[in-house]
Image (cartoon, helix red, strand yellow):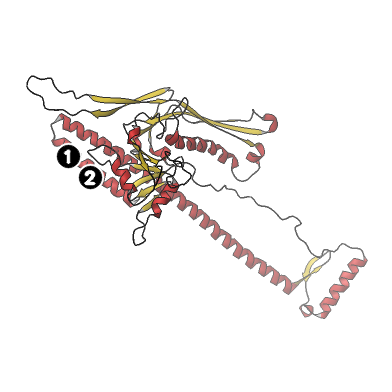
Amino acid sequence: MNDTIKSMIEAREAKKAELIERSKKSEDVNELRSINSEIDDINGQIAELRSLAQQEEKAAEERKAADDKVKAEKEAEARTAAVDTAKIAENIADGLRSAKFVQGKGFEKRDSSKLGGEADKEERMAKFGEDLKERRSVTVASSDIILPKFDAKTIKPGFLEISNLIDAVSTLNLPGGESYTQPYEKATAAGDYTPEGADYNEADVTFGHADIAKAKITAYSEMTEELEKLPAAPYAQVILDGIQKSVRKKIAKEIMVGAGTANTIVGIFSAKADAIDAATDKELAKIDNTTLDEIVFSYGGDEAVEGQCVLILSKADLKAFSSIRTTDGKPFYDIKIAGNGGSGTINTVPFIINSACGSITDSKTTAGTYCMAYGNLQNYQLTVFSQLDIRRSDDFKFKSGMIAHRGSVFVGGNVVSYNGFLRIKKAATA
């Protein structure tokens, strides 16, 4: 487990234990509610950190298994090559020392006195002449006219195409559902002094609600029957897996940029994300040594600096963070890459890369484009109304020998906490 994540988990476990002890001693109902709420938040933070740690450990195990496999294959090839080379050399030496080829009889024992001498040469030339005179077929050399071709039995995977964001946000399974509504608290008015006999001050709690409607996401692919039956490499399985990958890739991006219109997910950057007050959006023209502090301290309410939040950004802007230097030329930000490379930390602040984000540092990015989001990932709700259904058919293009695969899933998503994310836009000028 990553040392940073481990220490963060231990700190929260210690805080949780402290709160539990406080709850045992407290008899105040309001205090108990506050403590239980804080414990729930800490449990969510611990679960999120453990999830990140599991992803990192899984990726490390996969890399080690792949490296061990490659190492074993290379060692086996080296041993085989050494044995083959020694055997060939031995056979050649034995043949030169002890045998000669006689047409129609194969190899016979040679007279060592003639080995390489003139008599041996004369005998061979005489025999060759007799064979030609009698019109015999004589083989003087052999070679493959067409070189053999060998295909690998595995298919090397490409680069990471699915943002880790899809597995980090809050998820809710509602099989067969059509929609889902999540209420959230906006604010509570403060009490005030009241003169004798006067009316009490209003202190109503204001609420909002996030609507999550069903959206259908599909993927379709075809392949020839030859591709399934003939190659040694498992093309068919990769194509089948590609259906799932394609759907997850779309959802991972829509969590950020979903339009929120009919049959679409509501993304964090969408104007339809009603839980976020657009007035809280922040504009940045560049990334410098104050950028991370500016983001972290701009998020949340006036009474606290929120912990366990994640910065979602593009790879280009992560590179910009890594390029910032101190006066003595050292990296200003300590960036650690975790797991499969799609996430990590910047000065201990967790980040996730998502290619749907714009880039503040890209000159082609227009002013007003959303480029980053910062907040607790549990503030986004991804609702699954049906599991991914993948089907195969040989009938659609039976005459052509084509095999079709299709996959579909019904999901919805929205921000479900008031100002649950701080959105960062690109400013007009630097």
- Foreground of the two, 359 or 348: 359
Alpha-carbon span between mark 1 and mark 2: 11 Å
Circle 1/circle 2 CB separation < 8 Å? no
On residue 21, the disc is 1
> Residue furthest toward the front?
429
> Residue furthest toward the right?
133
Above or below residue 126? Residue 172 is above
Amino acid carrying label 1: it is Glu
Q: Is residue 196 left or right of residue 60?
A: left
Amino acid carrying label 2: it is Ala
Q: Is residue 144 in view from this perspective?
A: yes
Q: Is residue 282 left or right of residue 74?
A: left
Above or below residue 182? Residue 349 is below
Classify 10 Å Cα crowding around label 1: few (below 14), some (14-19), many (20 and above): few
Q: Residue at x 57, y 47 (%)?
A: 155
On residue 14, the disc is 2
On residue 64, the disc is none
Name the quadrant containing residue 173: top left
SS category of the residue bearing label 2: helix
> Residue furthest toward the left?
196
- Foreground of the two, 47 or 373: 373
Classify 10 Å Cα crowding around label 2: few (below 14), some (14-19), many (20 and above): few
- Foreground of the two, 94 or 379: 379
Q: Is residue 341 in view from this perspective?
A: no
Query: Residue 372: percent from the left, percent from the top?
Result: 39, 41
Q: Residue at x 23, y 25 (%)?
A: 205
SS category of the residue bearing label 1: helix
Q: Earlier in the sequence, mark 1 or mark 2?
A: 2
Query: Residue 269: percent from the left, percent from the top?
Result: 41, 35
Query: Residue 426: percent from the left, percent from the top?
Result: 40, 42
Q: Is residue 112 left or right of residue 293?
A: right
